[in-house]
Amino acid sequence: MRPVLAILRAVPLVVALGVGVGTAAGAQGGGEASTEHDPLGYVVDLDELDDPASIDAGEELFRTGCVSCHGLGGVGAPSGPPLYDAGAASAHFYLTTGRMPHTGSPEEQATRKPPVYSPEEIEDLVAYVASLGDGPPIPEVDPASASLQEGGDLYRAICAACHSASGAGGALSYGHNAPSLDEATPVQIYEAMLIGPGQMPKFDAYSEEELDSIVAYVGQLQRLEDPGGLSLGRVGPIPEGFVAIVIGTGGTMLAALLIGRRLHDDADPASPSAQEGER
Ligand code: HEC
Ligand code: HEC
């Protein structure tokens, strides 16, 4: 009985390994967790953020990596704002987009970079920053159920002025810029609207449904970025994972079609394709 159980338990692991290898080509980027199981880009486990052990570990990381600018306990310092109302949403956005730890002077814009911290460390830091006050939690994002039509209308009305109609971004005053929306994950897009990073205003007065619609529309813009091109290197891990699945499924279907056609031709010599072959 025991060995059988052991084998049964190993099955999911083997399947998971197979899937991992199959999409390894598509996975990239430090703190961005595997998109195979995380298409929205959560990176962290939302259920772990209340865990006291995680909060303690986060405090430890905060002491070495963040107090120089944000002060002990996040009270703020000359080179960084207080973090009382930042909340999990802001900490998650700034850490998963690699904006924090900030490099450069406080006036300089924090820009997107590969994350410095691992997904576990990000989880701990988010848990700690969230414990400092009652800022917004990481949102539950559901673009699949949203309206692209409504998202497009809203995007053109309230986002395009800064990020351009195509999402390519644009220049603002004081050498700052509204970045391209190419690389933002669904969770990061939603969070940006909740927290208003840098010079971006907050859009937290909109309904969850409206925010989900905008997230869905930005996702559409990201997919339209390279019409008709095979640019797997640029589009990022999410679409690449999809491509792996589509090619895999498509290939299997093609094989099934070819096999099916041959059987059909053998069985029915009068079929047009069989006659063509005899000519
Ligand atoms: C070199 C200084 C510096 C370091 C180090 C630094 N920060 Fe920051 N941080 C800033 C500045 C400046 C801003 C404001 C910039 C902005 O909003 O674009 C900021 C903004 C933030 C915000 C957004 C605040 C809000 O009101 O929503 C969060 C969250 C944050 N930092 C977390 C961290 C964490 C966590 C660390 C450690 C891993 C860290 N920072 C390290 C300078 C720093
Ligand atoms: C007033 C100009 C302005 C408007 C309007 C605006 N943004 Fe932004 N947005 C910015 C700026 C500036 C940043 C960079 C913030 C920083 O310095 O950290 C930004 C950053 C972002 C990011 C992070 C991108 C990344 O990859 O790191 C997302 C996502 C985003 N905005 C989405 C939106 C959406 C969606 C809307 C409409 C609901 C919107 N923005 C409206 C100026 C704007």
Image (cartoon, rainbow, N blue to C red):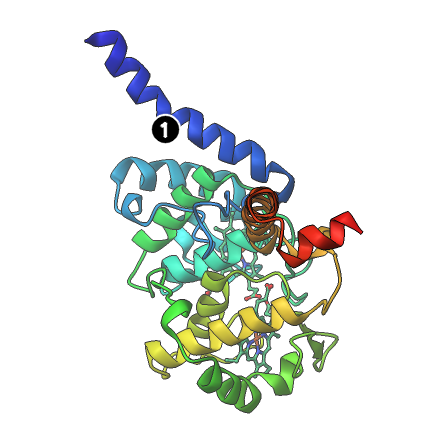
- Tell me which corner region of the image, top left, top right, bottom left or bottom right, holds residue 2: top left
Determine whether 78 is above or below 168 in the image: above
Mark 1 crowd level (few <14, some 14–19, many ≥20, 10 Å Cα): few
For residue 199, side relative to residue 93 (left or right): right
- Tell me which corner region of the image, top left, top right, bottom left or bottom right, holds residue 276: bottom right
Q: Where residue 47 appears, x then y in whole percent?
A: 27, 47
The secondary structure type at the circle numbered 1 is helix
For residue 274, side relative to residue 42 (left or right): right
Task: Tell me, yes or no, if residue 181 can be seen here.
Answer: no
Q: Nearer the viewer, residue 163 or 279?
A: 279
Q: Where residue 21 appears, x then y in whole percent?
A: 57, 32
Determine whether 187 is above or below 49 in the image: below
Q: Where residue 247 appears, x then y in whole percent?
A: 61, 48
Q: Where residue 108 appears, x then y in whole percent?
A: 68, 65
Residue shown at 40%/68% (left/top)? 144
Residue shown at 63%/53% (left/top)? 236
Three-letter amino acid code at disc 1?
A: Pro
Residue denoted by label 1: 12
Task: Tell me, yes or no, if residue 272 can be seen here.
Answer: yes
Q: Which of 49 and 23 is in front in this view?
A: 23
Q: Nearer the viewer, residue 253 or 148?
A: 253
Determine whether 243 is above or below 17 in the image: below
Q: Residue furthest front?
A: 270
Give the quarter of the figure containing the N terminus: top left
How many numbered discs, if any?
1
